[in-house]
Image: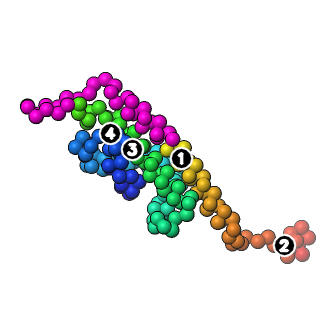
Amino acid sequence: MSLTTYCEFDEVRSALGVNDLELKDSVLALPVYEMGLVRELNKVSTSLTAAFSAVSAKSVGSRTEAEGGLYDAVHVFSVYAVARQVGVSLSVFAPKDVGDGKATISRFSGEPFKVTMDGINEYYQIAKDSVRQALEAYNGSNNTIAASLTPATLFKASGRSYDPVEGV
């Protein structure tokens, strides 16, 4: 799966406050960001990626309320989880000034992106909690459906026709 299964590159750039010249699609398409996102999703629940894939396969109109909630929550969480990863190097790729005189670029130094990263980390936590709640609602709706189905009988108890003590 690619990162765009979970969120769009422009959404990640928007969360970081950069444009496509400062953060190219080719950078966001690197496998490290997808692997990092999948790890973050698995930290919430190891069944989350499978549940998201099942919900994504359905058309928007055929999704239940719980499925729609799960899809939206994972989508928003994905934006902030990836932005959090990319934000580690934000000061390196986002220029402060770009000059045309001698093709100069100056970068920020210090912590000017601290406010941005604090905001991203705050939204990340809110989105993570939202994913947990949406997954619980999704699993609860699936358990209700499963409970209403009659389970198949796989094993059945029976008495012995032979007594091993008396040999009869």
Query: Which quadrant of the structure image shows residue 142?
Result: bottom right
Q: Position of residue 111 (x, y in %)?
A: 34, 25
Residue pictured at 56% horizontal, 48% vertical: 132
Name which residue lies at 42% across and 43% down. 80
Whole-number angstrom distance, CA of label 2 to CA of label 1: 52 Å
Q: Is residue 48 left or right of residue 4?
A: right
Q: Earlier in the sequence, mark 3 or mark 1?
A: 3
Rendered view: 33 above or below 65: above
Report if residue 36 is visible in the image. no
Task: Of the two numbered discs 1 and 4 on the same chain, state the one appearing first in sequence.
Answer: 4
Amino acid at pointer 1: Ser
Is residue 67 visible to the viewer in this orientation of the structure?
yes
How far is mark 3 from mark 1, CA to CA? 16 Å
Q: Is residue 109 magenta?
A: yes
Element marked by disc 4: loop
Cα–Cα span, label 1 and label 4: 23 Å
Say which mark, if any, is on residue 130: 1
Task: Say which element carries label 2.
Answer: loop
Q: Amino acid at mark 4?
A: Gly
Q: Are marks 2 and 3 in contact (CB under 8 Å)?
A: no
| Distance in Å between CA atoms under marks 2 and 3 | 60 Å
Front of the two marks 2 and 3? 3
Residue of label 4: 17
Magenta segment boundaries in residue numbering: 97-126
Q: Which residue is mark 2?
A: 159
Q: Please name the amino acid that badge 3 sits on.
A: Val
The answer to which of marks 2 and 1 sits earlier in the sequence is 1
Q: Residues within 10 Å of mark 3 (few under 14, many from 20)?
A: many
Total numbered labels placed on residues in the image: 4
Q: Quadrant of the N terminus?
A: bottom left
